[in-house]
Amino acid sequence: MIKKGELTVIGPETFYCMNIENGFAYLQNILHKNGRPKKVKHEEVPHMKDGEWFIPEKKVEKKPRTRSKINLSSLIKDNTDLQVSRSAKNFLMEWVETSVGNMVTNAERNAMQLGHGRISAAHIHWIETNEEVEGYWKENEDYTRG
């Protein structure tokens, strides 16, 4: 790994290692002494090793993906092998929309009571839906027909 006082090349520019602190190397462009040094993770700085250039690969940390759309059909396919009727899908979509709307309304009230200007996950109550319920509700068919 690069040491303080050594030179390195990143792209077309040459840098001088000014300091190494808290896992970061602070590199100053040798052509432009003014300005802030470039802060690079110490283990990702190209350096000479046994007379040859060693260019480490950058570690790309994936951030958790935020979903913006719910694909109900793919959720259903992932959780059952049975065919699912259109009325069942319509009923589930209605339930999802109503549940999310109610949860956001309640979360808004919780945030406002605490003086917060933004709703976070901590303001939302988790609705438990994994209890085993057996039955048949004919009125749900009527509900989806309108």
Image: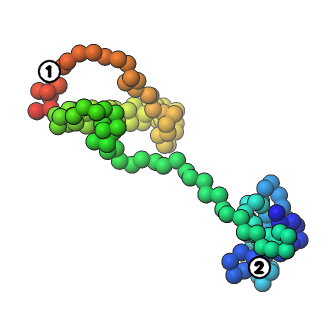
Which amino acid type is shown beneath numbered disc 2?
Thr
Q: What label sits on residue 14 in the rendered view?
A: 2
Q: Secondary structure at mark 1?
A: helix
Front one among 115 and 7: 7
- State which tag comes first along the sequence, 1 or 2: 2
Are there few (<14), some (14-19), or many (20+) residues within 10 Å of tag 2? some
Above or below residue 52? Residue 116 is above
The residue depicted at 48 percent of the width and 49 percent of the height is: 65
Does 68 sit above or below residue 49?
above
Which residue is depicted at the point 49% across and 37% down? 121
Closer to the camera in the image, 45 or 98? 45
Q: Amino acid at mark 1?
A: Lys
Q: Quadrant of the rendered structure where residue 77 is?
A: top left
* Numbered circle sitting on residue 138: 1
Q: Residue furthest top?
A: 134
Quadrant, the N terminus: bottom right
Instruction: Answer with the quarter of the image where residue 39 lies.
Output: bottom right
Q: Nearer the viewer, residue 41 or 78?
A: 78
Across and down, in percent, residue 78 comes to: 35, 38
Residue under the point 88% across and 67% down = 4
Instruction: Note whether 75 is above or below 1 in the view shown.
Output: above
